[in-house]
Image: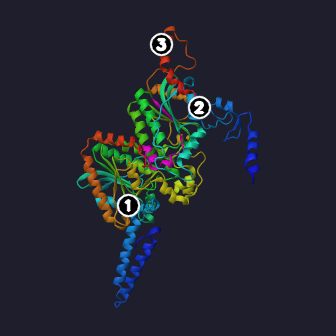
Amino acid sequence: MNWITNYVRPRINSLFSRREVPENLWIKCPECGQMLFHRELADNLNVCTNCDHHMAFSPRERFSALFDNGIFTEVKVPAPVADPLHFKDQKRYPDRLKAAQKATDEAEAMLVAEGEIGRTPIVAAAQDFAFMAGSMGMYVGNAIVAAAERAVKLRRPLVLFSAAGGARMQEGILSLMQMPRTTVAVDMVKEAGLPYIVVLTHPTTGGVTASYAMLGDVQIAEPNALICFAGPRVIEQTIREKLPEGFQRAEYLLDHGMLDRVTHRREMKDELVTILRMLLRETPAVRGDLPAPEPDEIAALDTSAKASADGAGAAKK
Amino acid sequence: MTNYLEFEKPLAEIEGKAEELRAMARANKEMDIEKEAAALDRKAETMLRDLYADLSAWRKCQVARHPDRPHCEDYIKALFTEYTPLAGDRNFADDHAVIGGLARLGDVPVMVFGQEKGNDTKSRIDRNFGMARPEGYRKAVRLMDIADRFGLPVITLVDTTGAYPGKGAEERGQAEAIARSTEKCLALRVPLISVIIGEGGSGGAVAFATGNTVMMLEHSVYSVISPEGCASILWKDADKMREAAEAMRLTAQDLKALGVIDRIIAEPVGGAHRARAETIAAVGKALEVELAALAKKKPETLRDERRKKFLGMGAKGLAA
């Protein structure tokens, strides 16, 4: 060991490894192994073009695809007490949080937004599995409370996309307390007579499944999503037997009466619009391009567009 | 015969010696050992007090799981009269891990239920070690419905490692069952008082313990996951449960500081398993006091206050 191995070589390597082309142009489908071109995959909403496997979809990507013209306004989520238990396992909790923030470029594991889908105003919340396994701590609790309050205030339905390993262990009992807390929040939406729709995405497990993610008026899941309380590995270790094919997957839950529907990501938006507009007793959604507006409608649109211009800016990121 | 915990080994030795001396004295009437035996007794007593004065989080877990600790059924039998168990979820089965029904606390008719772990191999298997399946939560929802309809206060006694990680339990939707039970707790227009009497394990505990007043016995624990589970996930080593127990803040004292529970019920020196009747009586007294305080409140107030409390849960961290 000398300064050449410690200093010079890494410097030289780093000079040579700086390539002009971005990495990950090709993404391998974890299910069928097919190599997929990133742009093609993005156009297909991160669903494998070969085997229809639904890959991870970040909240921001999801909202861009969900909301009309990709326009949405973020709903502000209050920041909770940081590291309430002064938790340390092999790493300090604040360090784990920082690493997750750097890796995802997001503040925390849930994004809340308002906007229109099929010209139907909604509030939506989406959980980010890439952020510490989407785990539910105080922030996710705050996000769901904020989403519910916003939905009640604007009298809009709440659509929630779940994805989580469960509770945020680093927040201990306080993460457990988010179960009753989020239950109160979604009940506020229901009691206001507004639809609460849950879309379960891969994977949704643990305390999240045992609270807000199973309390929707309508429960929809993406194909093959793992949905459970106790995970398959824990169960196999406990009962010491092999679990059946497809156990705890969306289709299995549908068969066992735990879900209303299993819906392909491509059809999700249309389906949400259809269901919501019926629950809200509104006219059927207009499919395809809208007819050209009349001149007086344009004038009306102009004024309303100005009013909402400030809010829409937040969607661009 | 006392069941000694691992950390009580030195105590077991001293108490064993005192017992031995007395046995010898019984066999041989000439011997006068009373002085030595009494000295050993005093030493044991001091040691017991010292051991229990400052239990680590992991030791508390062991005490909370002690096989001789009074269980749900012990409390129901001792504290309530006219106990009339009600069974079944009207869907699938009767879950023997959850017991409960109508009973009177003093003169007041109430609905009482909780998880029962069992006391010997046979009853433990019958009770599934106190781990409810979906039917248990659905039975609880039924009982709460009845209580709500007839204005009866609900008392829950929580003692569970957690939900049951089994195939059938998952197939029959235990996540949904837990969520509905928590939701029902929050919707009640009658008082709901919960006592964590042993282990408050994860969702299985929350489903019963979302109450107006949540109390914990001094050496009981309440956590999001077992220390072993937490250790195997975060430390990748289940043997780090001591560290995990410490980090998770699962003791009654920490939970009180965090505002998660309302009251700690003191246990006799040496823990509930050494003075069962005394512990049960202390819980009974606390229940009567809390019930009297809630009985004056209007149905809507009870519900609103409970919801407000849980909506604000976690706003406060531990002091730096």
- Which residue reaches farthest left? B107
**CB-based contact (under 8 Å), mark 2 and mark 3:** no
Q: Nearer the viewer, mark 2 or mark 1?
A: 2
Q: How is the image coloured?
A: rainbow
**CB-based contact (under 8 Å), mark 3 and mark 1:** no
Q: Which residue is under mark 1?
A: B71
Q: Residues within 10 Å of mark 3 (few under 14, many from 20)?
A: few
* Residue A150 occupies quadrant: top left
Q: Earlier in the sequence, mark 2 or mark 3?
A: 2
Residue B236 location (% of width, % of height): 58, 55
Q: Which residue is under mark 2?
A: A61
- The type of residue carrying mark 2 is Glu
In the rendered image, residues at marks 2 and 3 fall on the same chain: yes
Marks 3/1: CA distance?
69 Å
Marks 2/3: CA distance?
30 Å
Callout 2: chain: A
Callout 1: chain: B
Q: Is residue B290 magenta?
A: no
Q: Residue at x 48, y 14 (%)?
A: A303
Q: Which residue is under mark 3?
A: A300
- The type of residue carrying mark 3 is Ala
